[in-house]
Every structure is written in structure tokens, then in C-alpha cells.
Image: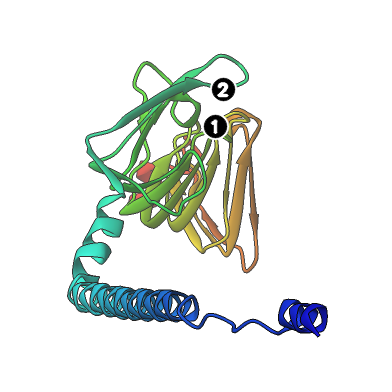
């Protein structure tokens, strides 16, 4: 009996301590509280960032709506304007020329080397013989520097070596080739009379002039009075 009691006492179940579960529960609650605080902080941060971005966009929109005129003025100011410009060069025969004007304007969106001119002039002996150089005058023009082409518009006036003076609303002068063309009506006066045409071309250094389209010419020649044409005294009697 004694040994049985001792054996039973050895196999009897022991009680599970409950005190160790309480610290674990407290730790889990502390972690949950810290996580909740962290999530709330993130929400506050993102909310504040969104409000800041929205405020910046509103300020930019307000400034943009009031700055349109300033941007337009800045774009216009990129045009280069020059007073009394002078462009010089030589044609294929090494004849010098000079293009001048009251004002030259280089537009922001213009092709490279293209300049608008106000009241342009051309000093170039291709268009006038003798010691004096010619002056081609117009109300406006455009000079293509890379191609050496001068376009003249509105009230164009120029002279040639043959002594003719022409008036038209357009003249395109190819400075490299000593050639002038015009697609507008032209009127000319000179030693041989007057001429009018719809278009014209002056080439070969001014020695060749071609008029096309509704050409009208009036030739005048000086008449020499001969002895046969002079009335005799007998005829008058």
C-alpha cells in the first residue's frame, strides 16, 4: 500500500501557472497602441502634404492667369530690332554692294539669316553705270543673307545702267547673279520712251531686259531737221 500511494503521488498532474500570461497580454496591447499612433501620424502627414500641394497649385494658377501679358511681352521682346543697319558683300564678279535701311527687324520665328527691313536701300553699281552707285528704294523689304536675295515691296524705285528708271510694287534682286525679277506691274521711262508690263526681268548685268504680260511701249526718237525739210524762201513768198 505504501508503494502504490507513493507511485500515485508521483504521477499526479501539476497545476499550470496563470501569472505568466498577464505580461504577454500587456505587451500586445502596448504594441497595438503604438501601431495605432503610427497610423494616425501617417494619415496626418499625407493629409497635410495633399493640402500643401493643392495650395501650391492654386497659387500657380492665380499667378499664371495674371502673368499672360508678361509672357506675351517677353515673347515679343525676343525680336531683335536694329537702327540704320548695313549689310555688305560681293557678287560672283566680285562687285561690291551694300544693303542699308532705316530699321532692321529679326523676327523670333524667322528663318536663319532673314531680316525684315523698313525703307531699304541698295548701293550697287550693277543697276547704274558711271561713278555714282544706284539706290534702290522701297517702303519695306526682306533680306535673305545666306542666299543674298533682297526682296523689295511697295513703291519700289530703281534705275539701270541703260538710263531707265522703273517703278513697281515688287522687285527681287539676286545679288550674286546681278539679276532682278518682278511679279508685279512695272512702268519704266528712259531714253527710248516709256514702257509698261505685268512682270519683268533684268539680267546679264543689266544688259538684257525682258517684259512680259500686256506690254505697252511708246518709243520716242529725236528728229534731226534736214535742209529738205526746211521751208525755202520761195515757198514762203
Do labels 2 and 1 touch, CB within 8 Å?
A: yes
Residue at image coords 34%, 50%? 138
Where residue 167 sits: x, y (%)?
41, 54
User: Could you say which quadrant of the image residue 131 lies in?
Assistant: top left
Residue 15 lies, with reference to residue 151, above or below; the image says below
Q: Quick one: SS at disc 2?
A: loop
- State which tag comes first along the sequence, 2 or 1: 2
Disc on res. 154: none
User: Could you say which quadrant of the image residue 51 lies in?
Assistant: bottom left
Residue 155 lies, with reference to residue 44, above or below; the image says above
Closer to the camera in the image, 41 or 35: 35
Closer to the camera in the image, 122 or 36: 36
Is residue 152 visible from the viewing direction of this image? yes
Q: Quick one: SS at disc 1?
A: loop
Closer to the camera in the image, 122 or 215: 122
Residue at image coords 37%, 40%? 136
As drawn, which residue projects farthest toward the front? 1
* Label 2, label 1: how far apart the Cα atoms are: 6 Å
Colour approach in the figure: rainbow
Write down the residue under mark 1.
Answer: 175
Where residue 16 sits: x, y (%)?
59, 82
Left or right, 197 with respect to 25, comes to: right
Where residue 166 sits: x, y (%)?
43, 49
Quadrant in the picture for the N terminus: bottom right
Left or right, 42 with respect to 164, comes to: left
User: Could you say which quadrant of the image residue 234 lies in?
Assistant: top left
Amino acid at each position: 500500500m505504501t508503494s502504490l500511494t507513493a507511485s500515485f503521488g508521483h504521477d499526479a498532474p501539476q497545476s499550470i501557472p496563470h501569472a505568466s500570461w498577464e505580461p504577454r497580454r500587456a505587451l500586445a496591447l502596448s504594441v497595438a497602441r503604438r501601431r495605432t499612433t503610427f497610423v494616425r501620424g501617417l494619415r496626418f502627414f499625407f493629409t497635410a502634404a495633399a493640402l500643401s500641394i493643392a495650395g501650391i497649385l492654386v497659387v500657380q494658377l492665380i499667378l499664371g492667369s495674371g502673368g499672360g501679358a508678361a509672357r506675351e511681352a517677353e515673347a515679343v521682346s525676343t525680336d531683335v530690332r536694329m537702327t540704320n543697319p548695313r549689310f555688305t558683300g560681293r557678287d560672283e564678279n566680285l562687285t561690291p554692294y551694300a544693303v542699308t535701311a532705316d530699321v532692321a527687324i529679326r523676327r523670333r520665328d524667322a528663318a536663319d539669316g532673314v531680316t525684315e527691313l523698313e525703307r531699304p536701300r541698295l548701293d550697287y553699281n550693277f543697276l547704274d553705270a558711271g561713278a555714282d552707285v544706284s539706290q534702290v528704294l522701297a517702303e519695306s523689304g526682306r533680306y535673305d543673307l545666306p542666299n543674298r536675295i533682297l526682296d523689295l515691296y511697295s513703291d519700289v524705285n530703281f534705275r539701270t545702267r541703260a538710263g531707265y528708271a522703273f517703278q513697281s510694287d515688287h522687285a527681287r534682286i539676286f545679288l550674286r547673279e546681278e539679276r532682278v525679277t518682278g511679279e508685279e506691274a512695272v512702268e519704266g521711262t528712259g531714253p527710248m520712251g516709256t514702257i509698261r508690263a505685268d512682270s519683268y526681268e533684268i539680267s546679264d548685268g543689266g544688259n538684257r531686259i525682258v517684259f512680259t504680260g500686256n506690254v505697252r511701249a511708246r518709243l520716242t526718237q529725236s528728229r534731226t531737221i534736214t535742209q529738205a525739210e526746211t521751208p525755202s524762201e520761195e515757198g514762203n513768198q
